[in-house]
Image (cartoon, rainbow, N blue to C red):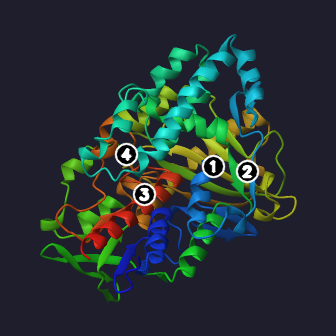
Amino acid sequence: MKYALKTVGVIGSGFSGLAAAASLAKAGYHVTVLEKNPSIGGRARQFEAEGFTFDMGPSWYWMPEIFENFYNKFGHTTADFYDLKRLDPSYQVIFSKDDVLDIPADYAELKSLFESIESGSGDQLDKFMAEAQYKYEVGINEYVWKPGLSVTEYFDWRVIKSAFKLQMFSSIAKQIDGYFKNEKIRQILKFPVLFLGATPENTPALYSLMNYADIKLGTWYPMGGMYEIIKAFEKICTEQGVIFVTNAEVTSINVEGTKVSSVKTLDKVYSFDYVVASADYHHVERNLLSPPSQLYSDEYWTKRVMAPSSLLFYLGLNTKLSGFDHHNLFFHTDFDKHADEIYTNPAWPTDPLFYVSVPSITDNDVAPQGFENVFILMPLATGLDDNEELRQPYFDLICNKIKDIKGVDLRDHLVYKRSYCINDFKDDYHAFGGNAYGLANTLMQTAILKPKIHHPSIKNLYFTGQLTSPGPGVPPSIISGQVVADLIIKANTSLK
């Protein structure tokens, strides 16, 4: 059923905002997306420089069925928009110069690799993956689609019956350590949950579903870069009649009684029947709403466990690299110290782990011929001081470490370099504390314990994205936008 007279304003054009906009427009709503920046895409924007094309944020394509299912709702398939290539090896893990593991895409090969490291670990992996598959199927089909507005959402026998099997109240670190003794295998299996923004010790064992996504569903790459996904979402939105307004920073959300009466940008005032805030949740409710309408105190936000920020480097090199895969994880030092400096005692790290993506290994179009496109990410605590003088020593530290391990000094081949860090996340996205990923998925910040997806006293104001349900990451953000759209459609239906 369509509701052509209803208007919706979506603040922000990241994945969650675009998913909400397309879904609502398909249902007959007149949707306008207000985007602060010159181009849409949020953290998944893209830029070009010196012949290189750089994805600014997300670089991992997991859970391909989430994308496919979204496209299918609009009569499309993934192949309508881009060529999706499965990476093999999925990624490389570097422990030292002489200890490098390529993680194969083939499950049987991975079992053999694990068995060569720890006898019996192949059979243990089968058991671990059986649990992970169950969690994935229940989690993706049940938990992540719940808006988290009330505990009654979970008064469902299927959910209650599965609660203990999902291991919501145990840590994934404990689960993995119970199956495997070798520290390398443990680190490899704990890696995917780092996308959720907390240490494995503080992440519910439910999220071994990420291991299933990694190992069984695979690591993929959309040829042309991750921005091809944004282009796909934009095309779908446009087909549904969504209007985009860029360079339209929202400065206030005005409330009268129990409804948003208007949304003001720097140069225009809009009136909408519904408002979906896909921008940073903290910024929206603490800076765009007036105090009587604010949901959470400064103290509340200060006590939130945030996923890390990141120090990013976008590099163009005038040479091809050897010994690298598309994705490369440098686990050359103990993560405990780095984790402590992210979560417990926030500080610029002493000896950081980092990640290097080289998409030009897979995609010739993102760098000039014979050149290399390199993206470096170092996890970092939120809320730290940030400036170029602090960033540069870490670039040198990372380059020195890569030189020691891989035998190449990236600085000798630089033709382009750009850094991006806490202050940039704040400036471009109003990101709380300069966070890169949102709110950490700890036990006390899961489901109904997240910031609410629907304002309890403002009937036509909704929130979506990585600081609310279901959580951080690209697939969860796509789901979040659809969940909000469904809530609005249901609310409007109830008024008929």
Q: Earlier in the sequence, mark 4 or mark 2?
A: 4
Residue sitting at the far bottom = 268
Among the 4 quarters of the image, the one containing residue 293: bottom left
- Residue 274's spot in the image, x, y percent? 30, 75
Examine the rendering and report whether any part of residue 3 can be seen.
yes
Cα distance, mark 3 to mark 2? 30 Å
Quarter holding the N terminus is: bottom left
Instruction: Kindly state the secondary structure of the residue where label 1 is placed.
Output: strand
- Please give the residue where the numbered disc 1 appears in the rendered image: 376
Residue type (three-letter) at the residue carrying disc 1: Ile
Q: Disc 2 or disc 1, which is closer to the eye?
A: 2
Q: Earlier in the sequence, mark 3 or mark 1?
A: 1
Task: Report the disc number at residue 480.
Answer: 3
Residue type (three-letter) at the residue carrying disc 2: Val
Q: Disc 3 or disc 4, which is closer to the eye?
A: 3
Examine the rendering and report whether any part of residue 35 can be seen.
no
Q: Earlier in the sequence, mark 3 or mark 2?
A: 2
Residue sitting at the far right = 370
- Residue 90's spot in the image, x, y percent? 72, 40
Q: Residue shown at 53%/76% (left/top)?
A: 237
- Please give the residue where the numbered disc 2 appears in the rendered image: 358
Residue type (three-letter) at the residue carrying disc 3: Ser
Local crowd size for mark 4, using a 10 Å CA cut-off: few (<14), some (14–19), many (≥20):
many
Q: Residue shown at 45%/42% (left/top)?
A: 197
- Residue 298's spot in the image, x, y percent? 20, 53
Q: Residue shown at 42%/48% (left/top)?
A: 144
Instruction: Kindly state the secondary structure of the residue where label 2 is placed.
Output: loop
Instruction: Kindly state the secondary structure of the residue where label 4 is placed.
Output: loop
Among the 4 quarters of the image, the one containing residue 367: bottom right
Q: Residue shown at 34%/53% (left/top)?
A: 147
